[in-house]
Image (spheres, rainbow, N blue to C red):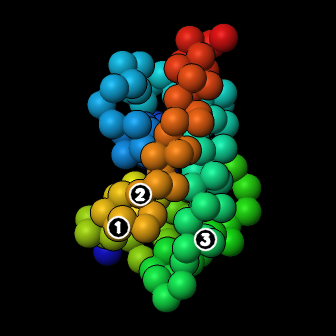
Amino acid sequence: MKNKTFTDHDIRVTISGIIKEIWGDGVASNRPENITPEVAAVVSDAVNQIKTCSKRLLAVDITYNFLYTAPGTIWEVIEGMAADMIANLCYDDKRNPLTTYIGWIRVLRGRRQYVACVNTAALNYRSRLELAFLDL
């Protein structure tokens, strides 16, 4: 297994991927180099709303249970997941910890009972996201 360290750029790529999963290709400024702390804060708020909404619907499906209990901002959670997986030798090309959040949103979008949670968060935070990309 190779030794991997994650950089701020890796986290920006992940947050950019989360934005694409929530809002699709319609966010023109969504590029890793444009991810600022303000953009990350909006994404963190949207993800927290999705977690709050979908947790109520979560009955048997606990595949991503650790995401619901992870404290901190999206940046801190992604850093923590990456560090933990590397420390436990759980990283390789097929198990990239930085894709976990993207996969979680994809799973939610693929299930009828959860799609409303993602769509509602996307609607509620779209304007804030665009303003954050503009530094307003």
| Quadrant in which the C terminus is drawn | top right
Mark 1, secondary structure of its residue? loop
Q: Hey, which quadrant is residue 72 in on the image?
A: bottom right
Relative depth, front residue between 27 and 78: 27
Residue 114: x and y, percent?
45, 64
Q: Is residue 101 left or right of residue 58?
A: left
Q: Is residue 57 left or right of residue 22?
A: right
Return the disc, 3 or 1, that comes first in the chain's sequence. Answer: 3
| Residue beneath disc 1 | 111
Q: Hey, which quadrant is residue 69 in on the image?
A: bottom right
Residue 52 to residue 33: above or below = below
Q: CA distance from mark 2 to mark 3?
A: 13 Å
Marks 3 and 1 close (CB-CB < 8 Å): no
Q: CA distance from mark 1 to mark 2?
A: 6 Å
Q: CA distance from mark 3 to mark 1?
A: 14 Å
Marks 1 and 2 close (CB-CB < 8 Å): yes
Residue 103: x and y, percent?
37, 61
Report crowding for label 1: few under 14, some 14 to 19, many 20 or more residues within 10 A (C-alpha). Answer: few
Residue type at tag 2: Val
| Residue beneath disc 3 | 55
Relative depth, front residue between 134 and 32: 134
Report crowding for label 2: few under 14, some 14 to 19, many 20 or more residues within 10 A (C-alpha). Answer: some
| Residue beneath disc 2 | 115
Residue closest to the far bottom: 60
Q: Residue at x 36, y 65 (%)?
A: 112
Q: Hey, which quadrant is residue 46 in on the image?
A: top right
